Structures are given as structure tokens and as C-alpha cells.
Amino acid sequence: MTKEITELERRSYPEPEPLSEIDRQMFGPVDPIAKTNKRLTTALITMTALVCVSVLGIVGLVAYFQTRPVRVMSINAAGEVESFLLNLSGFTLHKAETQAALRNSITNWGEGFYSRLRTPINGDVATLAYPRSFLFLSNELAQVYSQREQREHEIAGFMSNGDSEFKVFVTNVVFRNLDRKPYEADIYFDRVYYSQPLIVSAKKSYFVPIRFSANPSDEEIERLRKRANLDIDSVMRINPLVIAITQIGEVRDFSTSPSSQQH
């Protein structure tokens, strides 16, 4: 009886296989269970390292997109175009470079929103410039102007009638409040009329007050991208500070643009 039990135990628990030369070099003279445990430990360490690398990569990407610089164009006091990178981390309007970028963005909006051109020789035609200027409006204000255009067909009517073309040149943007939202600014611009392409027939000066916000966070950038149905690079080229104009005042005549009142 004892011998049968011994044989059964021997059959159930066979003798360990001899270790290969590689196993001896890697694990030494150990039993198979210890060898398996070492292999599992090595695999676990490898997997943990891969997970850590992946996590670090994701964190790095998030940090990059949160602090990524945006290239913006600015016009200096001498009328020269300057290009620089604006870091969006720690965004504040109380920086000279941020205000330069803000002034440039508002300039682009004003010139596109108020110009009325049919021939591209003088600039963007109204059917392109006017809708694109909606990217600088809040959702509510963009809907108001979009619905008004659908109802009154102002741009379509201009493109088909004989009214004079005119292009707007923003001469100054004066900020009146950058301490809290909504921010306020006055936009001064010249409206240049053309009797023919490149032939100026008249020029008049105006200014318009606006209220706006600026929030280049990832969430606002994504909302603007979805609303515009554009890729993110196109949105950031057009409106890098994610300006949202919430109120546009009445356009008023202004005889002399105060170009010396830069703030």
C-alpha cells in the first residue's frame, strides 16, 4: 500500500527537468517554480515600465497642448509687420505682446466685417471676408448676424448691384478696459471707396465701440473649431486668442483718426 502511494505521488509530481545552460546562466540552480516566478517578475517589470513610458508620453502631450506657442502677426509703430510666438500658458492681456496680438486680431475682424469688395484685386471679396469675420463673434452674436444675412441678403445684394466698393483700413484700436470681462475697445478705421479697382474716389473716417472676451483655452478653441467646421490650424491662424465679440456699438463718423492714442 505504501509503495502504491509512493508511485502515485511520484507520477503526480515528476522530477524537475534539468536546467538548460541558458537557464543556469540566467537563474542559477533553482527549481522550476522559482524560475517561473522570476520570469513573471521580469515580465511584470517590463509591462510596468511600458505603462509608465506611455503615461509620461500622454502627460507630455497634454502639457504641450496646454502651453503650446501660437505664431501671431503684429504691425509695429513704424507700420512694419512682425511675427512672434505667443505662449498661451498663463494667458493674460496685461502683456505688451498679448495686446499687440489682440490689436492685430481685432484689426483683422474689423477690416473683414466692414469692408465691401467685389474684386479681389483690392482684398478679400465680401462673400469671403464677411462670413469669416463671424469667427470673432460670440455664438449668440454670430447667430444674429447670420440670420440677418439669410433674411436680408445684404452681401448677396451688394455683389449683384452697382453700389461703390469700399475697403476698411483699421488705423487704431484703443482699449478702454482690460481688467475684467467684458473687455472694451474703440476701433478707429478709414473707409476707402473705389470708383474702379485701385482708383480711390473718397475716404471717410469712423470709429465703433465693442465689447469682447478672449480665452484661448483648449475648450474654447475646440468649441470655435466645431462651430466653424474647420481644422484647428486654420482656426488658430484666423483667431489665435479666441476673441468673442459680444457687443458691437453704432458706427460713428470721426474726422481724424487718433493714431497717437495707442494704449
Image (cartoon, rainbow, N blue to C red):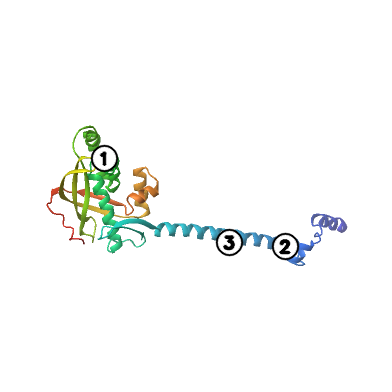
* Residue with the mark numbered 2: 35
Displayed quadrant of residue 65: bottom left
Name which residue type carries label 2: Lys
Name which residue type carries label 3: Ala
Asked if residue 10 can be seen in this view, the reply is yes
Give how far across and how far down residue 82 sits, in percent.
32, 58
* Residue with the mark numbered 3: 49
Could you tell me how far apart the alpha carbons at marks 1 and 2 are, in whole angstroms? Answer: 77 Å
Give how far across and how far down residue 77 sits, in percent.
25, 61
Q: Nearer the viewer, mark 2 or mark 3?
A: 3
- Identify the mark nearer the N-term, 3 or 1: 3
Give how far across and how far down residue 182 sits, in percent.
23, 55
Q: Residues within 10 Å of mark 1 (few under 14, many from 20)?
A: many
* Residue with the mark numbered 1: 126
Q: Nearer the viewer, residue 10 or 248?
A: 248
Name which residue type carries label 1: Ala
Q: Nearer the viewer, residue 42 or 224?
A: 224
Which residue is located at x 64 percent, y 59 percent?
43
Location of the C terminus by quadrant is: bottom left
199 is higher (above) or lower (below) than 67:
above
* Label 3: element kind: helix
Which residue is located at x 71 percent, y 60 percent?
36
